[in-house]
Amino acid sequence: MPDCIFCRIIRGEAPAKKVYEDERAFVFEDINPQAPTHVLIIPRKHIVGMKEAQPEDAEIIGYLHLVAAQIARERGIEDGYRTVFNVGPRAGQSVFHLHLHLLGGRSLRWPPG
Ligand code: 5GP
Ligand code: ZN
């Protein structure tokens, strides 16, 4: 998608602190981190959000979680981290390219706000 900020980051047209990439996924530091680790794990494919995901997207959605688990392992935050999809404006979704938040490195409250 030409005007999507996350597609532009994947293409290298917008700056971001890249953490990891492979043929399916791209990971970068959130610009406004809410925890010592706050990275965004996104599919290379432009999917608008979880509400819009299709059955053929099931594998990539699962894969994003495995990438998150690997990054959590590498960063030594396996004592407690959280993976989150914000779905819809009332849950705070502000970018409409599917992204999995990985938050950790501090105590995380429950329920979330
Ligand atoms: P949402 O609120 O849609 O669940 O999450 C969007 C996230 O993307 C936010 O945490 C926000 O800080 C982050 N974000 C928005 N624009 C950019 C950007 O241009 N670069 C980076 N690295 N993060 C961004
Ligand atoms: Zn996009």
Image (cartoon, helix red, strand yellow):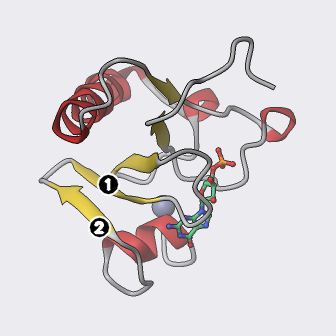
Asked if 32 appears above or below 11 in the picture, the reply is above
| Residue annotated with mark 2 | 18
Determine the residue located farthest toward the top in the rendered image: 111
Q: Secondary structure at mark 2?
A: strand
Asked if 112 appears above or below 7 in the picture, the reply is above
Q: Nearer the viewer, residue 44 or 76?
A: 76
Please give the name of the residue rendered at 55% of the width and 44% of the height, measured from the top-left corner. Answer: 35
Residue 22 relative to residue 11: left or right: left
Please give the name of the residue rendered at 20% of the width and 47% of the height, measured from the top-left corner. Answer: 24
Decide if ligand 1 comes within 8 Å of the CB at mark 1. Answer: no
Question: Looking at the picture, which amino acid does disc 2 mark?
Answer: Lys
Badge 1: residue crowd in 10 Å (few <14, some 14–19, many ≥20): many
Residue 8 relative to residue 12: left or right: right
Quadrant housing residue 21: bottom left
Q: Counting residues from the N terminus, which is met first, the one under dot 2 or under dot 1?
A: 2
**Residue 68 position within the rendered picture, expressed as x and y whole percent measured from the top left:** 30, 33
Please give the name of the residue rendered at 49% of the width and 44% of the height, measured from the top-left corner. Answer: 99
**Residue 46 position within the rendered picture, expressed as x and y whole percent measured from the top left:** 43, 54
Asked if 43 appears above or below 28 in the picture, the reply is above
Question: Looking at the picture, which amino acid does disc 1 mark?
Answer: Val
| Residue annotated with mark 1 | 27
Asked if 108 appears above or below 17 in the picture, the reply is above
Please give the name of the residue rendered at 52% of the width and 33% of the height, measured from the top-left corner. Answer: 106
Q: Are marks 2 and 1 in contact (CB under 8 Å)?
A: yes
Q: Secondary structure at mark 1?
A: strand
Badge 2: residue crowd in 10 Å (few <14, some 14–19, many ≥20): some
Residue 3 relative to residue 93: left or right: left
